[in-house]
Image: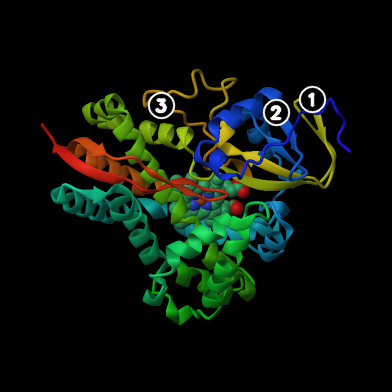
Amino acid sequence: MTPTLTPHSDVDLFADPVLEDPYPTYRTLRDLGGAVHLARLDAWALTRYDAVRGALGDWQTFSSSAVALNEPVNEMLVGTVLAADPPEHDVLRSVLADRLGPRAVRSLQADIATRAEALVEEVVARGEFDAVTDLAAAFPFAVVFDLIGLPDDARPNMLRWADATFNVCGPMNDRTAGGLLVVQEMFEWVATLKAGDLLDGSMGRAIFEAAEAGRIRPESCIPLLAAYATAGMDTTINAIANAVHLFAQHPDQWDLVRADPALLPGAFNEVLRFDAPVQVFGRRTTRVVDVEGTEIPADSQVLLLYGSGNRDERHYADPDRFDVTRAPVDHLTFGYGTHGCAGQALARLEAHAVLGALAARVHRLHVGEPKRHLNNVLRGIESLQVHGVELDR
Ligand code: HEM
């Protein structure tokens, strides 16, 4: 039983209209409290910046054993870096960190910049294109696919698999149920992979080499490979898609970035704060814990609402305003602490390359209405038609 004075809500955070625009609902929840009991899920939403950040920094209390919001998927995720707590987590993570750390990623910079410029040149020359499928999705897909060194037969399925992997991290609703079969299909395919199937020198091959060297157990190879493949694509795709959409909506902000390219890293942080590609992941409390005056029982499912924390007026002034000069380095979009995104250096590199190449050429993009892509966890766009491009002047 939840005491009546406990902040609580009947809202379905995963209903289509809320996913279309979750921000008014987030504000209502934040006004109720930093921790709000969600009756439909019998779970606790952490809504305010300090509450989300505090939980991210305390893995001993907020365990990743319930990173998904349903038990079948939490069982499926056992052994993955995302769902493991230290010390197991740190061993798995060290294998990924070798290849995703800032120094390793810096060596990719020239190649990624060249690829971004070629793609931007090509779509811009067409004059009309889909900013999501032709640009925002095409680029990270190609980059990450090659870096992991996956065999070509996965190409037609990879984005469908990645999307489903995020969907099934939601509560057990229709989207999750629909995604489960797709995820199973992906795991069956990944399980057939052997070291020799992955390109020599690739990130994927390095995982198998870590197992051969005894750094990780052989059974960890498949979950790590799946983590790379899914975490590295849809997230960056949605980030770039959201960026193009926001800059098309706010030409004054685009003009600022174009006038001073040094603003780009901060502007991308503002894109990430404004529309976090990953809106929510879960945790499980290991003990009774007080969050901003609300007591959450032990063994409770918790939702970390990154997207709500990023719009918390207690932390960011005028949070619903998209302002590239804000440069919010402390946003919650990559998480924080133990599970803070392992791929953020790569994501930034990719996004800066694409947005930088666009900024160097394009004065205005004229776009239609975006078609939102609804996913339990991700916030992104399925399609954004560009009807016209005004080149540099
Ligand atoms: C804009 C793009 C991205 C966003 C918004 C994003 C978001 C996140 C978030 C929120 C987490 C933390 C999960 C938690 O708190 O439990 C995370 C973890 C992770 N991300 Fe990213 N990510 C992005 C790009 C990437 C890329 C490009 C890769 C790899 C190629 C990647 C690999 C990972 C991995 C392996 C983890 C698990 C880390 C751990 O559990 O220790 N991500 N990401």
Image marks 1 and 2: residues in contact by CB distance under 8 Å: yes
Q: Is residue 187 left or right of residue 83?
A: left
Whichever of labels 3 and 1 marks the residue nearer the N terminus, that label is: 1
SS type, badge 2: loop
The C terminus is located in which quarter?
top left
Q: Eyeballing the image, is 169 above or below 330? A: below
Observer-nearest of 125 and 315: 125
Q: Position of residue 188 (x, y in %)?
A: 56, 76
To which residue does mark 3 refer?
A: 322
SS type, badge 3: loop
Q: Which mark is residue 211?
A: none
Q: Which mark is residue 34?
A: 2
Tag 2: amino acid: Gly
The N terminus is located in which quarter?
top right
Name the residue located 37 percent from the left edge and 75 percent from the top edge.
152
Cα separation between marks 3 and 2: 24 Å
Q: Eyeballing the image, is 128 above or below 297? A: below
Name the residue located 66 percent from the left edge and 22 percent from the top edge.
31
Q: Is residue 304 left or right of residue 360?
A: right
Q: Position of residue 183 (x, y in %)?
A: 57, 67
- Residue 24, image quadrant: top right
- Residue 360, image quadrant: top left
- Residue 79, image quadrant: bottom right
To which residue does mark 1 refer?
A: 293
